[in-house]
Amino acid sequence: MSNPRNPKAMLFVGDLSYADAYPLGDNTRWDTWGRFTERLVAYQPAIWSAGNHDIDFLPQYGETVPFQPYLHRYPVPYQAAGSTSPLWYSVKRASAYIIVLSSYSAYGKYTPQYKWLENELTKVNRTETPWLLVIMHVAFYSSYAHHYMEGESMRVVFEPFLVQNKVDVVLAGHVHAYERSERISNIAYNVTNSLCSPVDDHSAPVYITIGDGGNLEGLVWDLIEPQPGYSAFREASFGHGILDIKNRTHAFFGWHRNQDGYAVEADSLWLLNRFWNPLPESRAASA
């Protein structure tokens, strides 16, 4: 997030070490991944969300507490955010208010995560922190067949909060590819009106799936065709994204393919702040 030469924070959307892919959930893999990233995270704040490969639930080997290796290695300031769990919390960093949600914890109405989010959003001061970001692991919108609509039940519960509070960007992983959505929502559905497709909504976030930072399983290529109207850009390539917040009204997001070897965005978008500058952005993607 911010200038790549002097970032204010690094955001990780889950599935860190893939230690669970090895026999007995080999904890030395966590240590190896920690050493690999140490030179980065030692100098910039790292903000973590938990993925399915971080659960490490192995009751047959006595590992009966989910997320234990992850939580012991990556403490977060959840108590300062009034949360009862380190799996959901918030951080204020520069001009951004960053909310982390857990795709693998209960999120139904009246659950601790639901009640915390409902209360947390009332604390956001868009004068002090103009940009409101959310990170989680499972995407709400994706046009890849792999993990398609896996986040649907969580979307139904939480999407109204995101739209009503004018969240600017939602970052997710899980799908091992890249995708950026238009500003859309699907909160009008009920059993009588048949409105079950996403519609343009300038109060809604841009949803960015950026599960392409690296993994043991490779990229996913199974795109749903034709490309849905809510999908602005998608590509199965390893890469990373940079969000450069310029001021309270404008930010620039660029996605880079790792294999390109030069600092030119394969996809980019000027983001207009939903609270301070709620105008429609260009629907064109750069490539």
Image (cartoon, helix red, strand yellow):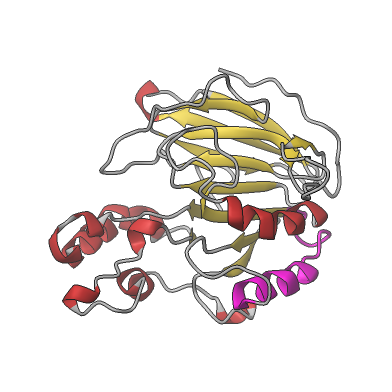
Q: Is residue 228 magenta?
A: no
Judged from this view, the residue extending furthest toward the front is 192
* Rendered residue at 68%/69% (across/down): 117
Residue 121 at x, y percent in the picture: 75, 67
- Judge from the rendering whether residue 237 lies leftward or rightward of residue 232; answer left or right: left
Q: Is residue 126 magenta?
A: yes
Please give left or right for residue 168 compared with residue 287 in the image: right
Q: In the picture shown, does residue 134 fall above or below 239?
A: below
Where residue 163 sits in the image (x, y, percent)? Answer: 78, 51
Whether residue 35 is situated above or below residue 233 in the rendered picture: below
Image quadrant in which you'd find residue 31: bottom left
Tell me if I can see residue 45 in this picture.
no
Query: In this image, 18 relative to 250: left or right?
Result: left
Name the residue rendered at 57%, 19% in the picture: 226
Query: Farthest residue in the left direction?
Result: 23
Point 66% across, 71% down: residue: 114
Foreground pick, 239 / 139: 139
Q: Write down the region rendered in magenta.
A: 111-131
Across and down, in percent, residue 159 comes to: 70, 54
Q: Quadrant of the image for the C terminus?
A: top right
